[in-house]
Image: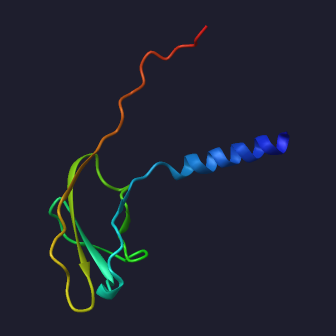
Amino acid sequence: MKKLLCLMAFAILLFASTGWTATLVSDPTPEEDQVTMFNLFFDGGTAIETVPVNRAIQYDMSGIADGSHVVKAQACNVWRCSDDSVPLVFTKKIPGVPVFLRIAP
């Protein structure tokens, strides 16, 4: 029982230390497109280059500021980059503070 409790405590600490993050993902691109990278444009800013993971976008958005955002993407191969994707509009919002903390009888 002690080993199980220690293992559970370790798992909880490991999970808590990683935190919750959101990941921007896409469907895989066709293999014949030979995509070598993706350009991501957040809020009209400069391109962020990302390497495909299984021919798709997987971008950790933990560093994104709170608030509303627009992101567009381009798929690139050795010849050129595609047109912009349809914009994705999202809001990163921190939840409100819990209220009425109490001990139930």
The answer to whether residue 17 is above or below residue 27 is above
Q: Residue at x 32, y 76 (%)?
A: 29
Residue 79 on image: x %, y %: 22, 92
Residue 43, compared with residue 55, is above or below; it is above
Total label count?
0
Q: Looking at the image, is 88 positioned above or below residue 46?
A: above
Which residue occupies 32% across, 87% down?
32
- Is 78 or 33 nearer to us in this picture? 33
In depth, the one of 98 and 90 nearer the eye is 90
Quarter residue 43 falls in: bottom left
**Whole-percent x, y for residue 7 in the image:** 75, 47
Q: Is residue 14 left or right of residue 56?
A: right
Residue 17 in the image, given as x and y percentages of width and height: 56, 50
On screen, residue 12 versus residue 84, left or right, reads right
In the image, is 62 to the left or to the right of 79? right
Between residue 66 and residue 83, name the one nearer to us. 83
**Horizontal placement of 22 versus 67: left or right?**
right
Q: Quadrant of the C terminus?
A: top right
The single residue placed furthest to the bottom in the displayed view is 79
| On screen, residue 46 above or below 6 | below
Q: Position of residue 46 (x, y in %)?
A: 19, 70
**Coloring scheme used:** rainbow
At a point 63% along the width and 46% down the height, the residue shown is: 13
